[in-house]
Image (cartoon, helix red, strand yellow):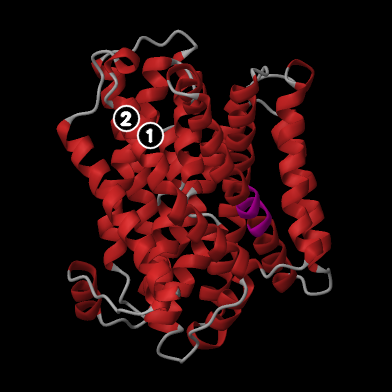
Amino acid sequence: MRGFFKKLGPGLITGASDDDPSGIATYSQAGAQFGFLTLWTALLTFPLMAAIQGMCARIGLVTSQGLTVTLKRHYPRPVLYIMLLFSFPAITLNIGADIQGMGAVCHMIVPSVPVWVFCVGITAAMMYVIIQYPYRKIATILKWLCISLLLYVVVPFILTINWKNVAFNTFVPQIQWNKDFWAIIVAILGTTISPYLFFWQATMEAEDSRKGIVVDKQLMSDMKTDVNSGMFFSNLVMFFIILTTGSVLFPAGITNINTVDEAARALEPLAGKLTYLIFASGVLGTGLLAIPVLAGSQSYMLAETFGWEAGLDKKFSQAKPFYLSVVISLIVGLGLEVIGISPMKALLYTAILYGVTAPVMIIMIMHIGNNKKVMKEYTNTSLSNTLGLLTFILMTAAAVAMIWFLF
């Protein structure tokens, strides 16, 4: 067990940060609106998510560079700029929505303090931690914060649930042909297979590779264990959030969740105070986990594009533009609270935006993964290519279906 846990690193953090307040909001809305009908998506997305993140990790290890640098070196510049154009609005919106979600939950627990005070405090704390501490220390903290996600796995066992119905909806896909259903499917796919995680995974693996670690079959095997474990953990939590809200909120007729704290508050009278506190604590833990990943991935993308000195292990004086971009992204995200955009709407819009833009990124990652000039003997396996292509087809089809039903 000790050997197994030593292998866990960027893959575990990537998988856990995927279940951020944005993910919690999306999965809660899916459960509240459709009950158990979307449980099958957790089973489906696990191999797809693992395949794409595995490709990104392999690119980072082999090239010792982030995804942005690889695109800049081997592909036309417009390709890189299009990727940035698609990614930045969604990441910024995601940061803001997560800050708002955490602030709302804190206010729910301590009603005497306004939401905006908590939002400012959370943003300031994030800035301090990211700038003050090297990534290795942050990563250790992030690994422990992953435990907060296990809280969601506990909740359904406190409740009375029809497990036969759960099993049926998990293994037999249920589909409704309307805009609301396809919007939530695109949101689930988008928040699960998120473009910012592609960049983060590659960059974190590259940072390890640059420290002189020899890339060999054993390292690739360890990386695969790390990534697969992280993605399994992520999808397990997703499954149990849909299960909890689907078994509590949906039968009670609470089908529209406007804020993250509303989802937690709705659980209290129906499932008890323990469930409510577990849900709220999970939102805070996952937010603290995800925001450094979101802000860091965006800053790495900028730094790699413009050739800045970058690295969460560097001091502020060594990488000023990099850290300033982290600060700006957090401040812009915080600005969503001032504008007054609904946290739940922002979270869902973020997930849908990811769902629409991810297919473009997936094609580029697959092309890099099969490029022998870049990857040498570590090009994609036939299984990786099959799962990658299936991911592209599924996400494109879901996005087209959603747009079709909207218009």
**Left or right of 20 in this view: 125:** right
In which quarter of the view is residue 61 placed? top left
Query: In the image, what residue type sits under mark 1?
Result: Met
Seen from the viewer's position, the closer of residues 163 and 211 is: 211
> Mark 2 packing: few (<14 Cα in 10 Å), some, or many (20+)?
some
Task: Tell me the residue that label 2 is attached to.
Answer: 367
Number of the label disc, if any, that sits on residue 169: none
Magenta-tinted stretch? 92-97
Please name the residue shown 30% across and 79% down the image.
176
Residue at 36 percent across and 16 percent down: it is 62
Quadrant in the picture for the C terminus: bottom left
Please indicate whether residue 369 sits to the left or right of residue 324 in the image. Answer: left
Residue where numbered disc 1 is placed: 364
Secondary structure predominantly adopted by residues drawn in magenta: helix
For the residues labelled 1 and 2, the Cα–Cα distance comes to 5 Å
Q: Is residue 96 shown in magenta? A: yes
Residues under numbered marks 1 and 2 in contact, where contact means CB atoms less than 8 Å apart? yes
Instruction: Please state which of residues 407 and 171 is positioned toward the viewer in this rendering.
Output: 407
Quick check: 93 above or below 257? above
Give residue 102's quadrant in the image. Answer: bottom right
Give the vertical position of 22 relative to 258 (above or below): above
Helix, strand or loop under label 1: helix
